[in-house]
Amino acid sequence: MFIKRALESVVKEVSNTYPVLLVTGPRQVGKTTLLERVADDHRKHVSLDDPVARRLAIEEPLLFLQRYEPPVIIDEIQYAPGLLPYIKLHVDKNKTMGDFWLTGSQMFQMMKGVSESLAGRVGILPMQGLSLSELKEVANEPYTTDVKRLLNRLKIAKKMNLTDIYKVIYKGSMPLLHTTEQSVERFYASYVDTYIHRDIRDLKQVADEIQFHRFLTACAARTSQMVNYSELAKDVGISSPTAKSWLSLLVSSGIIVLVEPYFNNALKRIIKAPNMYFMDTGLCAYLTRWTSSESLEVSAMSGAFFETFVVSEIIKSYLNAGKRPPVYYYRDSDQKEIDLMIENNGILQPIEIKKSANPGKDAGRHFSVLEKVDKESAEGSIICMSEDLVPISRKNWAVPVWLI
């Protein structure tokens, strides 16, 4: 079974614009499969997971490029960063668009070399797991609160009930879990083991793999919460600077996203810490030891997982269009809070996230703080379990989560 990825058209567009295309993201999200689907029969494919190919790329980069002459897909480029200057020389000499398609799972090891060697020559596409749109075979659109857009999307979206949504939340977004029959728990156990023992063990910042696993679990327990490095450090038994360094690894590798507070001189931004979200709710559920979607749905963390799911879906809707997600949140000293804000062309679009099926009129009551920035602020979304797209006040609408 194959699930069509929204990034296919973006890959073609970037490949026609840059000589080098780099698709980054966590392991198992489908980077290689995406490129193989888009590639024609003339494009070669080599993975640096293969120790023979890796040794050739490291020890004899010129011979490697002779053996795997462009156009070529090179998987896991982070294993041979010394190859990047030779790719640059080839690109500068030949000036052919789309010659090199690269993938990389460890952004924290790779991006410095890419920025130094391939600046101006590479188009970078961050990739995540499957979105709800991809699972339901619905066209991807960057999420906005625009009601006309939502009404049009209502015509093609596929309704889902609470049980359906939490099944997706529990299973997560890894393609293999949706295209093959296998145990969710075993998949993520193997995934975590691979991530820690293969991707993390070589990093000088991580000396203790067991402690790092505890840290990963502590982060999962705090998904959708504001980052507090001292609390994370205390729970794991590490220093605050170490907690900050380790969290940056999780962010760089695409496991976690940090949503920064919105800054504007007209608004009070007392809270400076970002909010933390796992990009894959299935991984988060595994780390926090939930064993079924039913138990997760009735748990104390049910709301946190629902919010995490919504935020990750909105972020994926932008990444899948090849765009940077313009997302922020708001919280001030008066306890006024907006879960998420999208900034488009200087206009702020507020979003409240609630598991409720019938949010009350006061659900978007804090949206009014944005009037200090723009008297005619955009419509607001209350993303929830509503069965239909309905207005709950003059400018705020209840938006079913399956409409994202």
Image: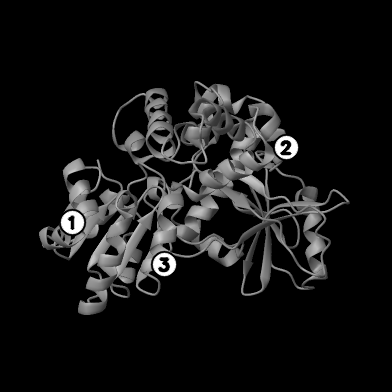
Q: Amino acid at mark 1?
A: Glu
User: Mark 2 highlights which residue?
Assistant: 230
Q: Amino acid at mark 2?
A: Ser
Q: Earlier in the sequence, mark 2 or mark 3?
A: 3
Q: Residues within 10 Å of mark 2 (few under 14, many from 20)?
A: some
Who's the residue at 36% across and 67% down the image?
117
Q: Earlier in the sequence, mark 2 or mark 1?
A: 1
Residue 319 position in % (x across, y down): 46, 58
User: Mark 3 highlights which residue?
Assistant: 116
Q: SS at mark 2?
A: helix
Callouts 2 and 1 close, C-beta under 8 Å = no
User: Mark 1 highlights which residue?
Assistant: 60
Q: Amino acid at mark 3?
A: Glu
Callouts 2 and 3 close, C-beta under 8 Å = no
Q: Is residue 328 left or right of residue 9?
A: right
- Count of marks placed on residues: 3
Q: Nearer the viewer, residue 94 or 156?
A: 94
